[in-house]
Image: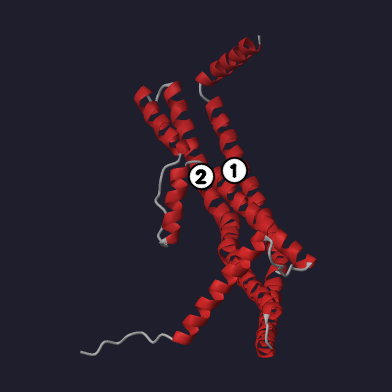
Amino acid sequence: MNINLPNFNVKNLVKEAGSTISRVVQLTEEKLGTTERTEYDLHFQNLAERADVTKTWTEKLVRDTESVLIPNPQNRVEDFIFEKIEKSKPKRLSNLEHLALDMIEAGGDFGQDLPYGQALIKAGQAEQKLGQCEHDFIATSGICFTQPLRKFLDGEMKTIGKERGILESKRLDLDACKNRVKKARSMLGQQSAERDLRVAQAEFDRQSEITKLLLDGISTSQASHLRHLHAFIQTQVRYYKQCGDVMEQLQRELAKLSLWPNARRLTRTICTESRA
């Protein structure tokens, strides 16, 4: 019976294992302070620091925005899972909509022909409208703000993190080669070490340029984030205006009911007593 085994390149495996060990040794010696290390230039350090700050704050902004849009942590987790498996989110009633249903049902039981029953039904219908406004606000905010920021974190920032990791590996390889050159005792060994050093230096320089280009791109990303922020604020303005319109309309409808004048006098009396 023929068994097809994967074709392993033994030389590559040995080389990779050797590189890993060399990096571990180099990193350990650096932490112990027994060897020197190549420091990144100031411009690169500033870019890297800005990238770290951008990642940290973007993650926090996304979490904070989502906690405002969907206060229930369990619902946020559920929505996240459905997004990952690319399925539609479950249609759940908001607290406003639960209140609306109870108001309408209570109004029906109290009597649709009575002022209080009518008022409850009208208030419940208004709460339903507010609930729909809330659903629209959450959906639009996700599209215009949180989703683009999450895409940035899952795309650009992950790529930057990966390339920075590769660069650090190249830096460790470079410094390990520098140490081998210093420790070479024979002319042949020194020539071999210097050849490895030139290769390591070239790979480090190339990866450094790649990483710098990606880090520089964060400025462009932040310009996009600014547009997303404007869109989110506009969505909020529209949402609160819609809610205000609904409540003003409810006030006008309640004012027509015979109970409403008494309710207004009662409200003023309660507020006066509270201040006293």
User: Which amino acid is tagged 1?
Assistant: Gln
Q: Residue at x 40, y 31 (%)?
A: 102
- Which residue was labeled with disc 2? 70
Q: Residue at x 60, y 53 (%)?
A: 59
Q: Residues within 10 Å of mark 1 (few under 14, many from 20)?
A: some
Q: Secondary structure at mark 2?
A: loop
Q: Residue at x 58, y 40 (%)?
A: 243
- Which residue was labeled with disc 1? 242
Task: Give the mark nearest the N terminus, 1 or 2.
Answer: 2
Would you say residue 143 is visible in this rendering?
yes
Q: Quadrant of the C terminus?
A: top right
Q: Residue at x 26, y 87 (%)?
A: 3
User: Which amino acid is tagged 2?
Assistant: Ile
In the image as oriented, which residue stretches furthest toward the front? 185
Q: Secondary structure at mark 1?
A: helix
Image location of residue 244, percent across then percent down: 61, 38
